[in-house]
Image (cartoon, rainbow, N blue to C red):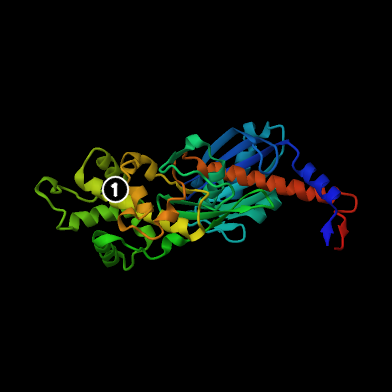
């Protein structure tokens, strides 16, 4: 059976009509919850929209017994109550595992339950893993939000991948949804796969981390604490000890200290950062090959953008293509654009984009429901 063409196009046109909507975005961690109210002028799926954040507030999670109380406090703010249009949807990015639109927070007693919130507040609510939100933000970024590491154009509608070294290592794949005319984000836990070292020094690092932790996942050497482990490994490596590089005092350093010292030219910190960037590049290449990411490979997170001076030496890009090993898939990786994401609000942008997706879906369903007999059907 198929839809009559004239009825189908009529409904679609109504669903894609431009409109102004109020939506809420959320960035919820164990310590703080940042909520924002947006006005969005929407032209429909696949078309440019105009967005303005009219109000935002950050609340300590300890100030409320439940997230429902926190959201109600936000809705009661005078700036939100004075909004002319009712809130249509909310997309909440949370630092935790999401299942069935629900996330029990690990560092607070909050449970973010989209179904319950929707029933209470009477607008659509989606609960996203924080890195899933980053994924939805990637297609909406401007050219000024990215630093290209190679001169390769994006292929329209081709798969994309995004990874984000920070407190942990987030990862997601993006696949084009032709029905929606936008990307669908598929988050994963690939960061917990076993680390595959390259070269004798990374093999020695693997042995060091395994002795410390009992295992060596990719995340253990490709996030903030991973950089710290790499630095500590180099301190313990007798092949690196030189008279002009003897550590003094407390040798344990946090990731921000290591990155700062590397940018100032410290030999040990620089070597640690270069190993770290090589590991990031290799994992980005592996992710790219898994889905042939000719739509782009994007490195987000809070660490790599601060290391652009070292990134520009080529260590990350060379590792991405496995240049030194003349990898047999090097030619394929050279067809995939590689970027560093410099916009720190990409997760908020992704929440905004997903909230607008909820609005569009609701309008489409409403358009079908308002049709006198529903979409007419005809047998083939």
The answer to whether residue 188 of the structure is visible from this angle is: no
Count the marks.
1
Frontmost residue, 348 versus 332 = 332
Tell me where residue 229 appears, x and y as whole percent: 28, 56
Q: Estimate the x, y position of residue 134 in percent, counting from the top left.
A: 52, 47
Q: Residue furthest left?
A: 243
Q: Is residue 326 visible?
A: yes
Q: Residue at 26% of width from left, 42% of height from top? A: 262
Q: Residue furthest bottom?
A: 214
Is residue 131 or residue 298 the one in the foreground? 298
Against 86, residue 246 (above or below) is below
* Disc 1 packing (10 Å; few <14; some 14–19; many ≥20): many
Instruction: Say above or below: 60 vs 168.
Output: above
Assign a secondary structure to mark 1: helix
15 with respect to 343 (left or right): right
**Towards the viewer: 65 or 33:** 33
Name the quadrant containing residue 302.
Answer: top left
* Quadrant holding the N terminus: bottom right
The x and y percentages for residue 19 are: 73, 36
Q: Quadrant of the C terminus?
A: bottom right
Task: Tell me the residue that label 1 is attached to.
Answer: 273
Q: Residue furthest right?
A: 372
Residue 351's image quarter?
top right
The image quadrant that residue 116 belongs to is: bottom right
Residue 357 x, y percent position in the rendering:
66, 47
């Amino acid at each position: 059976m198929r839809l009559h063409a004239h009825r189908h196009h009529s409904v679609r046109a109504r669903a894609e009509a431009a409109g102004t909507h109020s939506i809420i975005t959320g960035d919820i961690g164990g310590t703080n919850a940042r909520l924002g109210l947006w006005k969005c002028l929407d032209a429909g799926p696949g078309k440019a929209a105009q967005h303005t954040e009219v109000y935002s507030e950050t609340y300590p999670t300890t100030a409320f017994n439940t997230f429902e109380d926190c959201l109600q406090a936000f809705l009661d703010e005078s700036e939100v109550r004075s909004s002319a249009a009712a809130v249509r949807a909310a997309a909440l990015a949370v630092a935790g595992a999401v299942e069935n639109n629900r996330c029990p927070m690990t560092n607070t007693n909050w449970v973010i339950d989209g179904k319950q919130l929707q029933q209470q507040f009477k607008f659509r609510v989606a609960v996203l893993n924080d890195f899933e939100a980053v994924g939805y933000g990637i297609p909406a970024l401007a050219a000024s939000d990215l630093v290209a590491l190679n001169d390769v154009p994006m292929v329209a509608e081709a798969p994309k991948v995004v990874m984000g070294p920070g407190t942990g290592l987030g990862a997601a794949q993006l696949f084009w949804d032709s029905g929606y005319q936008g990307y669908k984000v598929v988050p994963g836990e690939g960061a917990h796969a076993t680390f595959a070292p390259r070269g004798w020094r990374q093999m020695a690092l693997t042995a060091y981390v395994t002795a410390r932790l009992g295992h060596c996942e990719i995340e253990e050497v490709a996030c903030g604490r991973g950089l710290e482990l790499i630095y500590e490994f180099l301190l313990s490596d007798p092949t690196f000890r030189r008279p002009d590089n003897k550590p003094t005092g407390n040798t344990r350093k946090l990731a921000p200290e290591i990155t700062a010292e590397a940018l100032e030219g410290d030999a040990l910190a620089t070597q640690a950062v270069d190993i770290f960037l090589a590991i990031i590049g290799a994992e980005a290449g592996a992710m790219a090959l898994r889905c042939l990411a000719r739509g782009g490979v994007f490195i987000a997170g809070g660490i790599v953008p601060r290391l652009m001076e070292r990134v520009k030496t080529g260590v990350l890009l060379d590792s991405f293509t496995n240049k030194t090993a003349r990898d047999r898939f090097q030619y394929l990786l050279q067809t995939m654009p590689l970027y560093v994401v410099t916009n720190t609000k990409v997760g908020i942008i992704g929440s905004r984009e997903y909230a607008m997706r909820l609005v569009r879906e609701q309008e489409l369903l409403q358009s079908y429901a308002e049709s006198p007999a529903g979409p007419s059907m005809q047998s083939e």
